[in-house]
Amino acid sequence: MIKTTSEKSIYPDFVTLKPDLQSALIIYPLYAGLHGELKSALFYFEQFFLLKEQKGNDMRDVFLGILSCEIRHLSYLYKTLYFLGVRPKLNENNKHFCAKKEIKSQTLSEILLDALAMESVAVNEYLSVLNKLKNEKVKKIIERILLDERLHCNILQEKLSEHTGA
């Protein structure tokens, strides 16, 4: 199976975090915001099962690997928020998470383009959050997750190139 988690570093320890409402509010959208980990996990979950119907499709393994990683991120962000003093819920400032904006991709190329666009937005969201954070321990956690998101972009770009021959 393709490695979908960066092996450059381990995930930093969140247990030593102290309550920090400002940092929690900054990272909360990464958990369940419009472009958060929950949306990514649901996307890869759906694509894995849709592609499962097609025999011999190696993209199932890729999507399953990325799904597992996104669930790890979701769990890690939940625990980070918890130790920062917030009990995470699946909404952000009354902006409830909604899977309403469905991806209507039909072909594998379209699915890969959607996934790549989604991961690129995630990278930008993580970079934006890093610029706002002052808590160095929380920054280390976000930087670590960002490594995986960048790896996902590289994997998806490679798979798209293989698929399209470009």
Image (cartoon, rainbow, N blue to C red):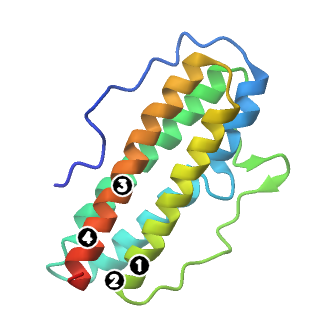
Q: How far apart are marks 4 and 2 (CA)?
A: 10 Å
Marks 4 and 3, how far apart in space?
Answer: 10 Å
Which residue is labeled 4 in the image? 159
Q: Is residue 153 above or below residue 50?
A: above
- Residues at marks 1 and 2 touching, judged by CB atoms closer than 8 Å: yes
Task: Select label 2 or label 3 by which is in front.
Answer: 3
Q: Earlier in the sequence, mark 1 or mark 4?
A: 1
Residue 158 percent coordinates (x, y): 25, 66
Horizontal and vertical percent position of residue 71:
45, 47
- Element at label 3: helix
- Secondary structure under tag 2 reads helix
Give the labeled residue for mark 1.
111
Q: Using the numbered discs, state the Cα–Cα distance from disc 1 to disc 4 in whole angstroms.
A: 11 Å
Vertical comparison of 107 with 34: above or below = below
Q: Which amino acid does label 3 sit on?
A: His
Secondary structure of the residue carrying numbered label 1? helix
Q: Residue 147: horizontal and vertical position, in percent? A: 39, 40
Give the quarter of the figure containing the C terminus. bottom left
Amino acid type indicated by mark 2: Leu
The local crowd at label 3, few if under 14, some if 14 to 19, many if 20 or more residues have their Cα within 10 Å, is many
Report which residue position mark 2 lands on.
108
Tag 1 and tag 4, C-beta contact below 8 Å: no
Label number found at residue 152: 3
The image quarter in which residue 84 lies = top right
| Residue 131 is at least partly visible in this image | yes
Name, please, the residue furthest toward the right: 94
